[in-house]
Image (cartoon, grey):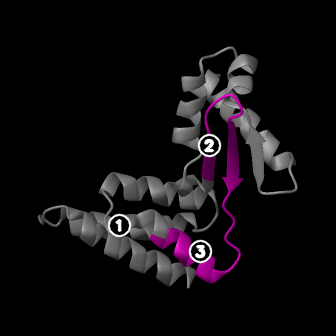
Amino acid sequence: MNLSHDIERYILNLLNGEEENFVSLRRKDLAEMFECVPSQINYVLRSRFTPEQGYLIESRRGEHGYIKIFRITCESTEEKISHINDIIGDSISLGEARRLLEALQDRELITGRERLIIEVALRHITGSGRYENPQEIADLLRNMLCGIMG
C-alpha cells in the first residue's frame, strides 16, 4: 500500500462512520498521524476528494485551521442534473470526460453500460476527423447524462 491510499482510506472510514455527510479534520494532525508533510495531505485531498468524485472541500489555513470534507449527495433528479452541469461547465476535454464518467459509475449515478454508450459517442465525435472541441464534448456529455438521469 502507499501512503496516499492509506490517507484516503482513513478519511473515507471517518466519513462512513459519521451520521452527517461531512467530516472535520486538521491537516497538521493528519500529517503527524501519517508521519508525512502537510503537502501530502493536500495532494490526497486534491486528487481523491474532488467534486467529480462526489466531494467538496472547505479549508481554512492557519493555527486554528481545519479541513471539512463534504460528501455530495444527490437525492433528486434536479440535484443530479445540477451537479452534472456544475462539474462539466462550458467545456471539458475528452480525458476529463472519461474520468468524470468513471467517477459517476463508481458513485453508481450511471451504470457501466451507460458509461460505455457515452464513451462510444464521445469517441465518434472526436475520432471522426474533426478537431476535438471541448465545447462540443461538454454539450454531448451534458445532454446524454441529463437524458439518462432525467
| Amino acid carrying mark 1 in the image | Val
Residue 130 placed where, x, y %? Answer: 12, 66
| Amino acid carrying mark 3 in the image | Lys
Please name which of the two marks, 1 or 3, marks the residue nearer to the observer: 3
Residue 63 placed where, x, y %? Answer: 68, 28
Which residue was labeled with disc 1? 120
Please name which of the two marks, 3 or 2, marks the residue nearer to the observer: 2
| Amino acid carrying mark 2 in the image | Ser
Which residue was labeled with disc 2? 59
In which quadrant of the rendered view does residue 110 lie? Answer: bottom right
How many numbered discs sit on the rendered protein? 3
Residue drawn at (35%, 66%) of the image: 120
Residue 104 placed where, x, y %? Answer: 55, 61
Category of crowding for the residue at label 3, using alpha-carbon neighbours closer than 10 angstroms: few (below 14), some (14–19), many (at least 20) = some
**Residue numbers of the magenta segment:** 56-85
Let me know if residue 60 is in the magenta part. Answer: yes
In which quadrant of the rendered view does residue 119 lie? Answer: bottom left
- Marks 2,1: beta carbons within 8 A: no
CA gap between label 1 and label 3 equals 22 Å
In which quadrant of the rendered view does residue 75 lie? Answer: bottom right
Looking at the rendered image, the quarter that the N terminus falls into is top right
